[in-house]
Amino acid sequence: MAQQNKKTLAFNGDEAVAFAVKQCNVDVVAAYPITPQTIIVERFSEYVANGEVQTQFVCTESEHSAITASLSASTTGARTFTASASAGLALMHEMLFVTSGSRAPVVMAIANRALSAPLNIHGDHSDSMAQRDSGWIQLYVENAQEAYDSIIQAYKIAESCDVSLPIMVGLDGFTLSHSLENVDILSDEAVTDFIGERQLPQVLTHEGKSVPFKLDPKNPMTMGPVAFQNYYFEFKRQQEEGMKNALKRIQEVNSEFAKISGRCYGNGLIDKYKLEDAEVIVVCAGSTSGTLKVIVDELRACGVKAGLLRLRTFRPLPVEDLKNALKNAKAVAVMDKSMSFGGFGGAIFHEVRHSLYDSPVHPPVINYIYGLGGRDYSPSELRIVFDDLAEIAKTGDTGKQVRYLGLRE
């Protein structure tokens, strides 16, 4: 079904997120400002002040309190949202695990920004990659349009009863958060119909009653209780099952969204660009993909079989999709906007290489750390990556497996 009542607005990435949240009938937004996320909650607070939404807006004293308030509201059955970046996300660290462990489907936007020290306010992925094992689903978007679309999709994914996990949607700080783009929006009615009301899993209480999973004085229960050796392991295994279920649900929601918007992002997990016969392939996440697509087009015009694989969903990791997408490659480069100190490469590099370990075909895989602290990278620098891959494909010699793009050494 084609999008009805199409309307295009000029938004930066943060504004696109705020507008999407406005349309999602969110009950509670709890937030604390931090650059470059501030515009999200600032703009949403205007919607509240103007009476455009019936949302309870909670101004907290810290990001730790913001995620705690979001979690607390979510456990009562409310639909909740928050946003953060960098040190703010780091301050949430403890409560990120509590939120996922409580199976609270909180949605959070992250305007990705470098972590201190030294202090830096610009964009890389070090903040969210540091939280990759916190039990949150992680999506990374390419542009403001996808930021808008992904927030809407996030609620339908997170609130699925067989998932019931929180989601963070990452958009590159300043590159996307503060850059103005045309964004095609859906009508309020279309978004409401698409998301629907929050569904709650049914659980069995200590009184033997089957009731919705929420804090309710009429049906007492506890969430996040003490669980020692006899039960803790089972709780964690259930979270992993929710992550596995999310792999299918993300794809389903991506397809369902395409029917009302005309837009989809690959299969929801990965977005393939000219991979059918590609021999040299770059893997990356986030806004860099837009520039890389232009380079791929230029190389194709010169007869080079280049391709791009954009990793949209980092958690849960789409292992089978990565294996299938890269099986015909002669050389692969993985781009990381973060470092895993002492870990031999970045986080995405680790995951791509281990995904290919059991594959019958093992293309050479190299890693490029780039863009840290918002370091600019030109199309000519990115083209060097493909040049290096062409040489590796020809000789089979990877040379240095972990490299740094645009670094003074």
Image (tube, grey):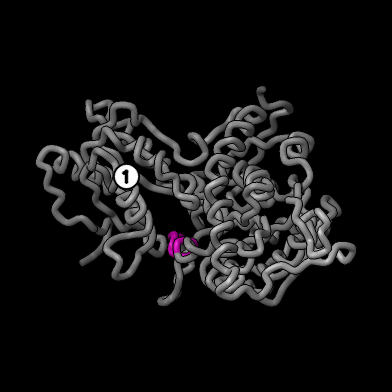
Task: Say if residue 329 shows up in the picture.
Answer: yes
Q: Amino acid at mark 1?
A: Pro
Instruction: Work out which quarter of the rendered image holds the N terminus and state it.
Output: top right
The residue positioned 29% from the left and 39% from the top of the image is 281
The residue at the far left in this view is: 395
Q: Residues within 10 Å of mark 1 (few under 14, many from 20)?
A: few
Location of residue 129 with respect to 87 vertically, above or below: above
Report x, y in % for residue 365.
24, 48
User: Per the image, is 276 magenta?
Assistant: no
In the image, 402 versus 326, the foreground residue is: 326
Who is closer to the viewer here, 100 or 107?
100
Vertically, is 207 above or below 153? below
Q: Quadrant of the C terminus?
A: bottom left
Look at the numbered disc 1 and give the secondary structure of its residue. Answer: helix
Residue 207 % position (x, y): 83, 63
Q: Position of residue 56 (x, y in %)?
A: 81, 61
Q: Residue tagged by mark 1?
A: 379
Does residue 78 appear in the picture of this structure?
no
Q: Residue at 79% across / 54% down in the picture?
A: 212
Position of residue 230 in the picture relative to residue 400 (left or right): right
**Residue 71 locus on image (x, y percent):** 70, 65
Residue at the spot 75% in from the left edge and 62% down from the top edge: 75
Span of residues in magenta: 123-129
Q: Is residue 396 left or right of residue 156?
A: left
From this view, report whether residue 325 is shown above or below residue 171: above
**Furthest-right residue in view?**
218
Figure disc tally = 1
